[in-house]
Image (tube, grey):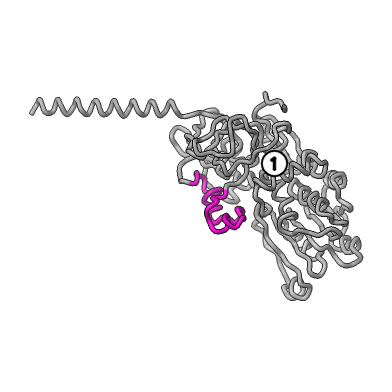
Amino acid sequence: MLLQLLLIEVVLGELICSIIHQIIIWRKNIMKIKAAVVEKKGGPFVIKDDVELSEMQADDLQIHMVASGICHSDEALRKGDAEIGYPIVLGHEGSGIVEKVGPEVKNFKVGDHVVLSFYGCGNCENCLKGMPTRCLNYAANNLSGVRPDGSAHFTEDGHRVSDMFDQSSFTTTTVVRERNAVKVPKNLDLRRLGPLGCGYVTGSGTVLNTLKPKPGETIAVFGTGAVGLAAMMAGKISGCTTVIAVDVVDSRLQLAKELGATDTINSKNEDAVAKIKELTDGKGVDYAVDTTGVTKVMEDSIQALAQGGTTATIAVTANHIDLDTWNDLCTNDRSIIGVNMGDSIPQVDIPRLIKFYQMGMFDFDKTEKFYPFEQINEANADSGSGKTIKPVLVIDDQYKPE
């Protein structure tokens, strides 16, 4: 009996040593990165250098992050307006350089410059119809806090840290699926390009992909942040002869003029609906885009429509609107639509926007201001206050445009 017990102890000891050894090996293979972590609902961004990055899968890219825009959706999740789970690494307007590729990756190689965007599964009915923004698995793939297969994107001391958009660009390195990435020209400044993955493609796509105004038609954009200015520039590109920008900040309206608005209205000083009617010979505009999510402004965007006009509401908001469906909609044959991510296909729309930028027709970079990664809380505050239209975090301060 004693001999049997000794044998059992030896076997158990060897098994425990083997398990410990495998754990040590596993731990050595984990890559630790620097990331801005929100530890609890409403908490500040805390930059940590011990966040553990998940291992690559077959269709993954490992991205060295150069920069990332800050979006109001990041702030909504930080505050807890919508919850994925805490702690969390946010950011979804990233740009960077491919440093590793999985064996099943077909369209990218090491050294490619990329912009990151949302993830569409590519297999559901809507994705197969060419509508990835309506992916039937959109929430699970982008807003569940984990990777599409349910595994953790990031951990800290072995505990899960939630992700965003299956990328989380507030990091020095991240791992994404091939479908998250869009290849961009190497001769352009990567620090500028990240916001094309969300804010700019959302505003411009709402006009170019959804509303599709014809040359000679009219459009009003309510709110001249990054999304609104992108929508306004897209109206100009589409050939709208009247492009009206509405805001309450004069400096933003001045920039809107520089970027192509034919008319500007400070709705703090004058009645926006009455002024729009005046500018359109009493008819109203053919199209309106609301980027504010403010109840009164959304309602004004509907009242400012011509007969047969359409308003697109694209703000992330919990606010409601009050409608007289008979007069506001039916009698005047007006429409209200919601648009997610500009109904975009990032791999198609982002290169198109870059072409417009190169032609001097889409000067999105005039909305941007650079901040060091370590100043993420200041940059986020400046975004919320309106001091900066599009803050961009420079994560790799050694990066030099080619």
**Quadrant placement of the N terminus:** top left
Left or right, 36 with reference to 247: left
Residue stretch in magenta: 120-148
Residue at horizontal 62%, vertical 55%? 131
Foreground of the two, 142 or 278: 142
Indicate the position of residue 231 as horizontal and vertical percent values. Answer: 77, 51
User: Number of marks in the image?
Assistant: 1
State the residue in front, 32 or 214: 214
| Residue that sits furthest to the front in the current view | 106
The spot of residue 108 in percent (x, y) is 59, 36
In depth, the one of 370 and 400 nearer the eye is 400
Q: Looking at the image, which is closer to me, 130 or 397?
A: 130
Q: Residues within 10 Å of mark 1 (few under 14, many from 20)?
A: many
Q: Does residue 188 show up?
A: yes
Residue 241 in the image: x percent, y percent? 88, 56
Farthest left residue in view: 1
Disc 1 element? helix
Q: Quadrant of residue 217?
A: bottom right
Name the quadrant containing residue 240.
bottom right
Q: Residue at x 86, y 53 (%)?
A: 266
Name the residue beneath numbered marker 1. Answer: 195
Q: Amino acid at mark 1?
A: Pro
Q: Assess whether residue 124 is covered by the magenta stretch.
A: yes
Where, quadrant-wise, is the C terminus in this rendering?
A: top right
Residue pictured at 76% horizontal, 69% vertical: 334
Q: Is residue 387 visible?
A: no
Residue 399: x and y, percent? 68, 26
Q: Is residue 140 above or below residue 54?
A: below
Q: Is residue 3 magenta?
A: no
Q: Which residue is found at the position 81% from the left and 54% from the top? A: 238
